[in-house]
Image (cartoon, rainbow, N blue to C red):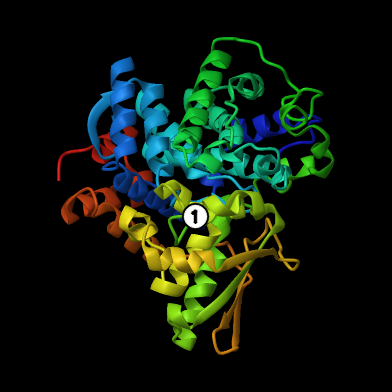
Amino acid sequence: MQPGSSALMSERLAEFAAGLRFEDIPVEVRERAKYLILDAVGVALASSRRDFASVAMAAFTELDGGRYPVIGMSERLALRDAVVMNGLLIHGLDYDDTHIEGVVHITASCFPCALGVASQVEATGAHLLQAYVLAVEANARLGAVAKGAFHQVGLHPTGIIAPFGCSLAAGSLYGLNHEQFVMAQGIALSTAASSSRQFNPEGAWTKRLHPGWGAAAGITAATLARHGFVGPRATYEGDYGLYRAHLGPSISHCDLGLATANLGTVWETANVAVKPIPACHLVHACSDAAAIIARDHRLRASDIATIRALVPKEAVHVVCEPVARRRRPATEYAAQFSIHYAVACGLLRGRFSLHELELAAFTDREALALADRVEYGVDTASEYPRYFSGEVIVTTTDGREFRHRERINRGAADRPISGADIEAKFMDNAALAVSSGRAAEIRDALLQVDRLESAKELADVLAGRGV
Protein backbone atom coordinates (compact mmCIF):
# COMPACT_ATOMS: atom_id res chain seq x y z
CA MET A 1 0.00 0.00 0.00
CA GLN A 2 1.58 3.26 -1.14
CA PRO A 3 0.31 6.61 0.08
CA GLY A 4 -0.65 9.12 -2.54
CA SER A 5 1.24 12.22 -3.60
CA SER A 6 -0.21 14.73 -1.12
CA ALA A 7 1.93 17.82 -0.84
CA LEU A 8 2.21 17.81 2.94
CA MET A 9 3.93 15.14 5.00
CA SER A 10 1.12 15.10 7.54
CA GLU A 11 -1.37 14.30 4.80
CA ARG A 12 0.71 11.48 3.40
CA LEU A 13 1.22 9.95 6.83
CA ALA A 14 -2.51 10.36 7.51
CA GLU A 15 -3.31 8.55 4.27
CA PHE A 16 -1.06 5.69 5.29
CA ALA A 17 -2.54 5.52 8.79
CA ALA A 18 -6.14 5.66 7.62
CA GLY A 19 -5.60 2.94 5.04
CA LEU A 20 -3.39 0.53 6.98
CA ARG A 21 -4.86 -2.84 7.83
CA PHE A 22 -3.32 -5.62 9.89
CA GLU A 23 -3.15 -7.84 6.79
CA ASP A 24 -1.05 -5.19 5.00
CA ILE A 25 1.81 -5.73 7.43
CA PRO A 26 4.07 -8.57 6.23
CA VAL A 27 4.13 -11.59 8.52
CA GLU A 28 7.87 -11.26 9.17
CA VAL A 29 7.38 -7.62 10.23
CA ARG A 30 4.60 -8.62 12.63
CA GLU A 31 6.85 -11.28 14.13
CA ARG A 32 9.74 -8.86 14.56
CA ALA A 33 7.38 -6.38 16.18
CA LYS A 34 6.40 -8.98 18.79
CA TYR A 35 10.04 -9.58 19.66
CA LEU A 36 10.72 -5.85 19.95
CA ILE A 37 7.83 -5.59 22.40
CA LEU A 38 9.09 -8.65 24.29
CA ASP A 39 12.51 -7.03 24.64
CA ALA A 40 10.96 -3.79 25.89
CA VAL A 41 8.79 -5.50 28.49
CA GLY A 42 11.79 -7.41 29.83
CA VAL A 43 13.65 -4.15 30.38
CA ALA A 44 10.56 -2.65 32.01
CA LEU A 45 10.38 -5.56 34.45
CA ALA A 46 14.04 -5.12 35.36
CA SER A 47 13.44 -1.39 35.85
CA SER A 48 10.39 -1.94 38.04
CA ARG A 49 12.53 -2.78 41.08
CA ARG A 50 14.83 0.25 40.74
CA ASP A 51 14.63 3.33 42.93
CA PHE A 52 13.67 5.64 40.06
CA ALA A 53 10.63 3.44 39.40
CA SER A 54 9.36 3.54 42.98
CA VAL A 55 9.91 7.30 43.20
CA ALA A 56 8.05 7.93 39.94
CA MET A 57 5.20 5.62 40.92
CA ALA A 58 4.81 7.38 44.26
CA ALA A 59 4.55 10.71 42.46
CA PHE A 60 2.02 9.51 39.88
CA THR A 61 -0.07 7.77 42.53
CA GLU A 62 -0.20 11.01 44.50
CA LEU A 63 -1.40 12.90 41.42
CA ASP A 64 -4.28 10.54 40.69
CA GLY A 65 -5.23 6.91 40.84
CA GLY A 66 -6.93 5.02 38.04
CA ARG A 67 -7.65 1.65 36.50
CA TYR A 68 -4.81 1.16 34.03
CA PRO A 69 -2.05 -1.36 34.81
CA VAL A 70 1.68 -0.66 34.85
CA ILE A 71 4.21 -3.27 33.75
CA GLY A 72 5.49 -5.30 36.69
CA MET A 73 3.80 -3.15 39.35
CA SER A 74 0.66 -3.60 41.42
CA GLU A 75 -0.53 0.03 41.40
CA ARG A 76 -2.95 1.33 38.78
CA LEU A 77 -3.00 4.83 37.32
CA ALA A 78 -4.99 7.13 35.08
CA LEU A 79 -4.51 6.29 31.40
CA ARG A 80 -1.90 8.87 30.45
CA ASP A 81 0.00 8.47 33.71
CA ALA A 82 0.16 4.70 33.17
CA VAL A 83 1.49 5.35 29.66
CA VAL A 84 4.18 7.71 30.98
CA MET A 85 5.13 5.22 33.68
CA ASN A 86 5.38 2.32 31.21
CA GLY A 87 7.56 4.43 28.93
CA LEU A 88 9.76 5.33 31.89
CA LEU A 89 10.19 1.68 32.81
CA ILE A 90 11.03 0.58 29.27
CA HIS A 91 13.58 3.38 28.86
CA GLY A 92 14.72 3.31 32.48
CA LEU A 93 17.91 1.29 32.03
CA ASP A 94 18.81 2.60 28.56
CA TYR A 95 18.67 -1.04 27.50
CA ASP A 96 15.72 -0.61 25.11
CA ASP A 97 15.72 -0.70 21.32
CA THR A 98 16.74 2.08 18.95
CA HIS A 99 16.03 2.89 15.34
CA ILE A 100 19.63 3.64 14.44
CA GLU A 101 19.13 5.89 11.44
CA GLY A 102 16.44 7.89 13.22
CA VAL A 103 18.45 7.88 16.48
CA VAL A 104 15.14 7.28 18.24
CA HIS A 105 14.28 4.84 21.04
CA ILE A 106 11.20 3.47 19.35
CA THR A 107 9.31 0.94 21.46
CA ALA A 108 9.57 2.96 24.68
CA SER A 109 6.89 5.33 23.37
CA CYS A 110 5.07 3.30 20.73
CA PHE A 111 4.20 0.28 22.86
CA PRO A 112 2.97 2.12 25.99
CA CYS A 113 0.77 4.25 23.72
CA ALA A 114 -0.67 1.28 21.83
CA LEU A 115 -1.12 -0.78 25.00
CA GLY A 116 -2.84 2.03 26.90
CA VAL A 117 -5.30 3.05 24.21
CA ALA A 118 -5.98 -0.54 23.11
CA SER A 119 -6.85 -1.35 26.71
CA GLN A 120 -9.07 1.73 26.94
CA VAL A 121 -11.13 0.83 23.85
CA GLU A 122 -10.79 -2.93 24.42
CA ALA A 123 -9.26 -3.47 20.99
CA THR A 124 -8.00 -6.84 19.84
CA GLY A 125 -4.38 -7.82 20.23
CA ALA A 126 -4.04 -7.67 16.44
CA HIS A 127 -5.18 -4.04 16.37
CA LEU A 128 -2.76 -3.22 19.20
CA LEU A 129 0.08 -4.70 17.15
CA GLN A 130 -1.06 -2.82 14.05
CA ALA A 131 -1.12 0.48 15.94
CA TYR A 132 2.33 -0.21 17.37
CA VAL A 133 3.81 -0.91 13.92
CA LEU A 134 2.15 2.24 12.56
CA ALA A 135 3.80 4.36 15.26
CA VAL A 136 7.17 2.69 14.70
CA GLU A 137 7.04 3.30 10.94
CA ALA A 138 6.17 6.98 11.38
CA ASN A 139 8.59 7.78 14.20
CA ALA A 140 11.51 5.95 12.62
CA ARG A 141 11.13 7.97 9.44
CA LEU A 142 10.50 11.28 11.18
CA GLY A 143 13.66 10.74 13.21
CA ALA A 144 15.69 9.81 10.14
CA VAL A 145 14.78 13.11 8.46
CA ALA A 146 16.96 15.03 10.95
CA LYS A 147 20.05 12.87 10.34
CA GLY A 148 21.14 13.12 13.96
CA ALA A 149 20.76 16.90 14.15
CA PHE A 150 18.48 16.94 17.21
CA HIS A 151 21.31 15.68 19.40
CA GLN A 152 23.62 18.37 18.08
CA VAL A 153 21.32 21.18 19.26
CA GLY A 154 20.86 19.72 22.73
CA LEU A 155 17.62 17.79 22.25
CA HIS A 156 16.74 14.13 22.78
CA PRO A 157 15.08 13.01 19.53
CA THR A 158 13.13 10.21 21.22
CA GLY A 159 11.00 12.68 23.15
CA ILE A 160 10.75 15.20 20.31
CA ILE A 161 9.53 12.63 17.78
CA ALA A 162 7.36 10.39 20.00
CA PRO A 163 4.12 12.45 19.98
CA PHE A 164 3.70 12.25 16.21
CA GLY A 165 3.76 8.52 15.59
CA CYS A 166 1.89 8.02 18.84
CA SER A 167 -0.86 10.36 17.68
CA LEU A 168 -1.27 8.06 14.67
CA ALA A 169 -1.24 4.90 16.79
CA ALA A 170 -3.84 6.30 19.17
CA GLY A 171 -5.83 7.60 16.22
CA SER A 172 -5.86 4.18 14.62
CA LEU A 173 -7.29 2.64 17.77
CA TYR A 174 -9.83 5.49 18.12
CA GLY A 175 -10.89 5.08 14.48
CA LEU A 176 -9.91 8.54 13.23
CA ASN A 177 -10.52 9.47 9.60
CA HIS A 178 -7.96 11.00 7.25
CA GLU A 179 -8.64 14.61 8.23
CA GLN A 180 -8.57 13.79 11.93
CA PHE A 181 -5.20 12.07 11.49
CA VAL A 182 -3.87 15.26 9.88
CA MET A 183 -5.21 17.35 12.75
CA ALA A 184 -3.81 14.95 15.36
CA GLN A 185 -0.28 15.43 14.01
CA GLY A 186 -0.71 19.19 13.96
CA ILE A 187 -1.94 19.21 17.54
CA ALA A 188 0.98 16.96 18.54
CA LEU A 189 3.31 19.73 17.38
CA SER A 190 2.05 21.84 20.30
CA THR A 191 2.03 19.04 22.88
CA ALA A 192 5.57 17.78 22.33
CA ALA A 193 7.92 18.21 25.29
CA SER A 194 11.25 19.98 24.95
CA SER A 195 13.19 16.79 25.78
CA SER A 196 16.32 18.67 26.81
CA ARG A 197 19.58 16.73 26.91
CA GLN A 198 20.70 18.52 30.08
CA PHE A 199 20.29 15.15 31.80
CA ASN A 200 23.43 14.01 30.02
CA PRO A 201 26.19 16.13 31.61
CA GLU A 202 24.55 15.81 35.03
CA GLY A 203 23.59 12.13 35.01
CA ALA A 204 20.01 13.13 35.87
CA TRP A 205 16.91 10.93 35.65
CA THR A 206 14.85 13.07 33.28
CA LYS A 207 15.71 11.24 30.06
CA ARG A 208 13.63 8.34 31.33
CA LEU A 209 10.50 10.50 31.16
CA HIS A 210 10.81 11.47 27.51
CA PRO A 211 9.30 8.47 25.65
CA GLY A 212 6.23 8.03 27.84
CA TRP A 213 5.61 11.76 28.06
CA GLY A 214 5.67 11.91 24.26
CA ALA A 215 3.30 8.94 24.04
CA ALA A 216 0.84 10.64 26.41
CA ALA A 217 1.09 13.79 24.27
CA GLY A 218 0.21 11.72 21.19
CA ILE A 219 -2.86 10.29 22.94
CA THR A 220 -3.93 13.80 23.95
CA ALA A 221 -3.52 15.04 20.38
CA ALA A 222 -5.52 12.17 18.89
CA THR A 223 -8.32 12.62 21.41
CA LEU A 224 -8.56 16.35 20.73
CA ALA A 225 -8.63 15.69 16.98
CA ARG A 226 -11.39 13.11 17.44
CA HIS A 227 -13.51 15.79 19.10
CA GLY A 228 -12.90 18.30 16.30
CA PHE A 229 -10.06 20.40 17.71
CA VAL A 230 -8.23 22.18 14.88
CA GLY A 231 -4.47 21.92 14.47
CA PRO A 232 -2.05 23.17 11.78
CA ARG A 233 -1.49 21.16 8.63
CA ALA A 234 2.15 21.97 7.76
CA THR A 235 3.26 20.18 10.91
CA TYR A 236 6.69 19.16 9.68
CA GLU A 237 7.75 21.43 6.81
CA GLY A 238 6.07 24.69 7.90
CA ASP A 239 7.93 27.87 8.79
CA TYR A 240 7.40 26.98 12.46
CA GLY A 241 7.02 23.25 11.94
CA LEU A 242 8.85 20.46 13.71
CA TYR A 243 12.21 20.75 12.00
CA ARG A 244 12.62 24.51 11.54
CA ALA A 245 11.39 25.26 15.06
CA HIS A 246 13.84 22.85 16.67
CA LEU A 247 16.80 22.87 14.31
CA GLY A 248 16.91 26.37 12.84
CA PRO A 249 19.66 26.63 10.20
CA SER A 250 20.47 22.93 10.64
CA ILE A 251 17.31 22.13 8.70
CA SER A 252 19.52 22.42 5.61
CA HIS A 253 20.94 19.02 6.53
CA CYS A 254 17.50 17.40 6.77
CA ASP A 255 15.95 15.23 4.09
CA LEU A 256 12.19 15.70 4.41
CA GLY A 257 11.57 13.07 1.76
CA LEU A 258 12.72 10.34 4.15
CA ALA A 259 9.50 10.77 6.16
CA THR A 260 7.38 9.07 3.53
CA ALA A 261 9.90 7.33 1.27
CA ASN A 262 8.81 3.76 0.50
CA LEU A 263 6.11 4.00 3.14
CA GLY A 264 4.19 0.73 3.14
CA THR A 265 6.73 -1.13 1.01
CA VAL A 266 9.91 -0.86 3.08
CA TRP A 267 9.23 -1.56 6.76
CA GLU A 268 11.47 0.25 9.22
CA THR A 269 10.23 -2.02 12.01
CA ALA A 270 12.69 -4.56 10.63
CA ASN A 271 15.51 -2.03 11.04
CA VAL A 272 15.06 -1.40 14.75
CA ALA A 273 18.16 -2.43 16.70
CA VAL A 274 17.90 -4.40 19.94
CA LYS A 275 20.55 -3.46 22.49
CA PRO A 276 23.04 -6.10 23.67
CA ILE A 277 24.54 -3.62 26.16
CA PRO A 278 22.62 -1.53 28.78
CA ALA A 279 24.20 1.78 27.80
CA CYS A 280 24.06 4.52 25.19
CA HIS A 281 24.30 2.98 21.73
CA LEU A 282 27.26 5.22 20.95
CA VAL A 283 29.53 3.29 23.34
CA HIS A 284 28.60 -0.24 22.22
CA ALA A 285 31.06 -0.71 19.38
CA CYS A 286 34.05 0.50 21.38
CA SER A 287 33.11 -1.54 24.44
CA ASP A 288 32.81 -4.66 22.28
CA ALA A 289 36.07 -3.87 20.48
CA ALA A 290 37.88 -3.49 23.81
CA ALA A 291 36.50 -6.82 25.06
CA ILE A 292 37.65 -8.56 21.88
CA ILE A 293 41.17 -7.12 22.18
CA ALA A 294 41.44 -8.21 25.82
CA ARG A 295 40.17 -11.69 25.02
CA ASP A 296 42.24 -12.29 21.87
CA HIS A 297 45.47 -11.04 23.38
CA ARG A 298 44.89 -12.04 27.00
CA LEU A 299 45.64 -8.59 28.26
CA ARG A 300 45.59 -7.60 31.92
CA ALA A 301 45.09 -4.08 33.13
CA SER A 302 48.73 -3.89 34.17
CA ASP A 303 49.80 -4.66 30.57
CA ILE A 304 48.09 -1.57 29.15
CA ALA A 305 49.86 1.75 28.72
CA THR A 306 47.46 3.79 26.56
CA ILE A 307 44.03 3.35 25.03
CA ARG A 308 42.47 5.31 22.18
CA ALA A 309 38.77 5.04 21.31
CA LEU A 310 37.58 6.29 17.92
CA VAL A 311 33.94 7.38 17.84
CA PRO A 312 31.64 9.17 15.37
CA LYS A 313 32.09 12.94 15.66
CA GLU A 314 28.43 13.19 16.66
CA ALA A 315 29.19 11.08 19.75
CA VAL A 316 31.85 13.35 21.22
CA HIS A 317 29.61 15.61 23.28
CA VAL A 318 27.26 12.73 24.14
CA VAL A 319 29.70 10.18 25.59
CA CYS A 320 33.20 11.73 25.58
CA GLU A 321 33.00 15.23 27.05
CA PRO A 322 33.49 16.70 29.56
CA VAL A 323 36.33 14.24 29.99
CA ALA A 324 36.69 14.55 33.76
CA ARG A 325 33.04 13.60 34.31
CA ARG A 326 33.12 10.75 31.80
CA ARG A 327 36.16 9.24 33.52
CA ARG A 328 34.50 9.47 36.93
CA PRO A 329 30.80 8.63 36.45
CA ALA A 330 28.92 9.73 39.55
CA THR A 331 25.77 7.69 38.86
CA GLU A 332 24.78 4.59 36.93
CA TYR A 333 23.26 6.88 34.31
CA ALA A 334 26.54 8.74 33.93
CA ALA A 335 28.28 5.36 33.55
CA GLN A 336 25.96 4.50 30.65
CA PHE A 337 27.12 7.60 28.80
CA SER A 338 30.87 7.28 29.32
CA ILE A 339 33.10 6.00 26.52
CA HIS A 340 35.95 5.87 29.05
CA TYR A 341 34.10 3.58 31.44
CA ALA A 342 32.61 1.44 28.64
CA VAL A 343 36.03 0.75 27.15
CA ALA A 344 37.52 0.08 30.59
CA CYS A 345 34.75 -2.48 31.25
CA GLY A 346 35.46 -4.22 27.96
CA LEU A 347 39.16 -4.47 28.69
CA LEU A 348 38.89 -5.36 32.37
CA ARG A 349 35.76 -7.52 32.52
CA GLY A 350 35.12 -8.52 28.92
CA ARG A 351 31.54 -7.22 29.08
CA PHE A 352 29.22 -4.34 29.84
CA SER A 353 26.16 -5.77 31.57
CA LEU A 354 23.67 -4.58 34.17
CA HIS A 355 26.23 -5.60 36.80
CA GLU A 356 28.53 -2.84 35.48
CA LEU A 357 25.89 -0.32 36.53
CA GLU A 358 26.11 -1.22 40.20
CA LEU A 359 27.81 1.32 42.47
CA ALA A 360 30.66 -1.04 43.35
CA ALA A 361 31.38 -1.57 39.64
CA PHE A 362 31.54 2.03 38.42
CA THR A 363 33.52 3.17 41.46
CA ASP A 364 35.98 0.27 41.25
CA ARG A 365 39.55 1.61 41.45
CA GLU A 366 40.96 -0.70 38.79
CA ALA A 367 38.20 0.21 36.33
CA LEU A 368 38.68 3.92 36.96
CA ALA A 369 42.44 3.61 36.58
CA LEU A 370 41.87 2.12 33.13
CA ALA A 371 39.30 4.83 32.31
CA ASP A 372 42.04 7.40 33.04
CA ARG A 373 44.11 5.88 30.24
CA VAL A 374 41.33 6.16 27.65
CA GLU A 375 41.61 9.02 25.17
CA TYR A 376 39.10 9.55 22.39
CA GLY A 377 39.38 10.58 18.76
CA VAL A 378 36.99 11.10 15.86
CA ASP A 379 36.37 8.09 13.64
CA THR A 380 36.81 9.51 10.14
CA ALA A 381 35.46 6.29 8.60
CA SER A 382 32.22 6.41 10.59
CA GLU A 383 28.98 5.66 8.74
CA TYR A 384 26.85 7.32 11.42
CA PRO A 385 23.86 7.27 11.69
CA ARG A 386 23.56 4.14 9.54
CA TYR A 387 25.89 2.33 11.94
CA PHE A 388 27.27 3.37 15.32
CA SER A 389 30.78 2.13 14.59
CA GLY A 390 33.81 2.31 16.84
CA GLU A 391 37.48 1.36 17.04
CA VAL A 392 39.85 0.80 19.95
CA ILE A 393 43.66 0.96 19.80
CA VAL A 394 45.62 -0.38 22.77
CA THR A 395 49.32 0.14 23.33
CA THR A 396 50.96 -2.13 25.88
CA THR A 397 53.70 -1.30 28.34
CA ASP A 398 56.18 -3.27 26.22
CA GLY A 399 55.33 -1.29 23.06
CA ARG A 400 52.94 -3.64 21.25
CA GLU A 401 49.82 -2.20 19.58
CA PHE A 402 46.50 -3.97 19.18
CA ARG A 403 43.45 -2.57 17.44
CA HIS A 404 39.98 -3.76 16.63
CA ARG A 405 37.20 -2.07 14.70
CA GLU A 406 33.48 -2.79 14.95
CA ARG A 407 32.13 -1.31 11.73
CA ILE A 408 28.57 -2.44 12.42
CA ASN A 409 27.42 -2.34 16.03
CA ARG A 410 25.87 -5.52 17.39
CA GLY A 411 22.09 -5.42 17.15
CA ALA A 412 21.94 -3.15 14.10
CA ALA A 413 19.70 -4.17 11.21
CA ASP A 414 22.68 -5.58 9.27
CA ARG A 415 23.91 -7.45 12.34
CA PRO A 416 20.68 -8.30 14.14
CA ILE A 417 20.08 -10.05 17.41
CA SER A 418 17.96 -13.14 16.80
CA GLY A 419 14.58 -13.93 18.30
CA ALA A 420 16.19 -16.59 20.47
CA ASP A 421 18.71 -14.04 21.75
CA ILE A 422 15.90 -11.60 22.54
CA GLU A 423 14.04 -14.31 24.45
CA ALA A 424 17.17 -15.05 26.47
CA LYS A 425 17.67 -11.34 27.21
CA PHE A 426 14.01 -11.07 28.22
CA MET A 427 14.24 -14.00 30.62
CA ASP A 428 17.43 -12.60 32.19
CA ASN A 429 15.85 -9.19 32.71
CA ALA A 430 12.51 -10.54 33.88
CA ALA A 431 14.28 -12.73 36.46
CA LEU A 432 15.24 -9.55 38.30
CA ALA A 433 11.57 -8.92 39.09
CA VAL A 434 9.39 -12.03 38.71
CA SER A 435 9.55 -15.81 38.94
CA SER A 436 10.52 -17.89 35.92
CA GLY A 437 6.93 -19.11 35.66
CA ARG A 438 5.57 -15.55 35.53
CA ALA A 439 8.25 -14.58 33.02
CA ALA A 440 7.26 -17.48 30.77
CA GLU A 441 3.59 -16.50 31.03
CA ILE A 442 4.38 -12.93 29.99
CA ARG A 443 6.67 -14.10 27.16
CA ASP A 444 4.02 -16.42 25.75
CA ALA A 445 1.30 -13.77 25.92
CA LEU A 446 3.46 -11.24 24.09
CA LEU A 447 4.51 -13.63 21.35
CA GLN A 448 0.85 -14.47 20.73
CA VAL A 449 -0.49 -10.95 21.13
CA ASP A 450 -2.17 -10.95 17.72
CA ARG A 451 -4.36 -13.86 18.82
CA LEU A 452 -5.77 -12.12 21.87
CA GLU A 453 -9.41 -11.06 21.77
CA SER A 454 -8.78 -8.14 24.12
CA ALA A 455 -5.67 -6.04 24.67
CA LYS A 456 -6.91 -5.42 28.20
CA GLU A 457 -6.12 -9.07 28.91
CA LEU A 458 -2.50 -8.46 27.90
CA ALA A 459 -2.23 -5.36 30.08
CA ASP A 460 -3.43 -7.36 33.07
CA VAL A 461 -0.88 -10.10 32.38
CA LEU A 462 1.92 -7.51 32.31
CA ALA A 463 0.89 -5.94 35.60
CA GLY A 464 2.49 -7.04 38.86
CA ARG A 465 1.17 -10.11 40.61
CA GLY A 466 4.03 -10.55 43.02
CA VAL A 467 7.13 -12.66 42.62
Residue drawn at x 55%, y 78% is: 305
Q: Secondary structure under badge 1? A: helix
Q: In this view, does 64 lie to the left or right of 398?
A: left
Q: Which of 286 and 401 is in front in this view?
A: 401
The part of the image, by quadrant, that contains residue 238 is top right
Above or below: residue 272 compared with residue 296: above
**Can the viewer see residue 443 in this picture?**
yes
Residue 54 position in % (x across, y down): 28, 33
Report how many numbered discs are placed on residues in the image. 1
Indicate the position of residue 394 as horizontal and vertical percent values.
58, 78
Instruction: Examine the rendered structure and indicate whether residue 290 appears above or below residue 12.
Output: below
Q: In this view, does 202 lie above or below 351?
A: above
As rendered, which of 353 and 130 lies closer to the eye? Answer: 353
Report x, y in % for residue 38: 37, 51
- The kind of residue tagged 1 is Val
Q: Quadrant of residue 271?
A: bottom right
Q: List the residue tagged with mark 1.
A: 27
Where residue 245 appears, as percent x and y from the top left, is: 74, 27
In the image, 4: left or right of 120?
right
On the picture, is 439 further left or further right than 249? left
Depth check, front residue: 13 or 361: 361
- The residue lying toward the viewer, choosing from 411 and 371, is 371
> For mark 1, does the 10 Å Cα neighbourhood hold few (<14), some (14 to 19), or many (20 or more) residues?
few
**Quadrant for the N terminus in the image:** top right
Q: Residue 298 lies in what quarter of the image?
A: bottom left
Please tell me which residue is depicted at 33% across the width and 54% down the height of the picture: 358
Q: Is residue 270 visible?
A: no
